[in-house]
Image (cartoon, rainbow, N blue to C red):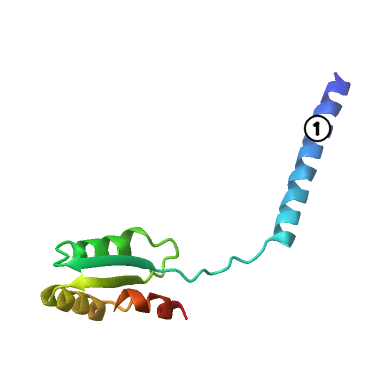
């Protein structure tokens, strides 16, 4: 019976030592997470009836960082009224910008 107890204690000691070594290796080899510059591009055209709802959904739902991903409203031929609504949206939140499709690359430069 003592042999069984000794075997169980040796097993638990080996598991505990392995767990400690795993934690130590993880702490020493842990890399800092990199930040990725990303944005959500929302192409809109014509009257874009649901543009405001889409932007609010994107700002609320797809935010893994907690800081808020920028939403680029790509003006692919908006009417004057829709363009005015897009500008009002952009002024209401610093994470929203209205750009032409050709200017999207300049946003990341």
- In the rendered structure, the answer to whether residue 43 lies left or right of residue 22 reads left
Q: Nearer the viewer, residue 79 or 61?
A: 79
The percent position of residue 80, horizontal first and vertical second, equals 13, 77
Residue depicted at 21% across the width and 72% down the height: 77
Residue 55 falls in image quadrant: bottom left
The percent position of residue 64, horizontal first and vertical second, equals 43, 61
Residue 74 falls in image quadrant: bottom left
Q: Nearer the viewer, residue 21 or 67?
A: 67
- In the rendered structure, the answer to whether residue 31 lies left or right of residue 64 reads right
Residue depicted at 34% across the width and 67% down the height: 41
> Element under label 1?
helix
Q: Residue lying farthest right?
A: 3
Residue 81 falls in image quadrant: bottom left
Residue, disc 1 = 11
The percent position of residue 24, horizontal first and vertical second, equals 75, 55
Residue 5 versus residue 58 in the image, above or below: above
């Amino acid at each position: 019976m003592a042999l069984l107890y000794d075997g169980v204690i040796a097993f638990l000691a080996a598991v505990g030592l392995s767990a400690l070594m795993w934690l130590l290796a993880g702490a020493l080899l842990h890399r800092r997470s990199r930040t990725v510059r990303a944005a959500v591009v929302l192409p809109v055209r014509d009257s874009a009836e649901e543009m405001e709802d889409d932007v609010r959904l994107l700002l609320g739902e797809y935010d893994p960082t907690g800081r808020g991903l920028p939403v680029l409203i790509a003006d692919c031929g908006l009417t004057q009224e829709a363009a005015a609504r897009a500008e009002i949206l952009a002024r209401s939140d610093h994470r929203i910008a209205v750009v032409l499709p050709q200017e999207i690359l300049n946003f990341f430069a």
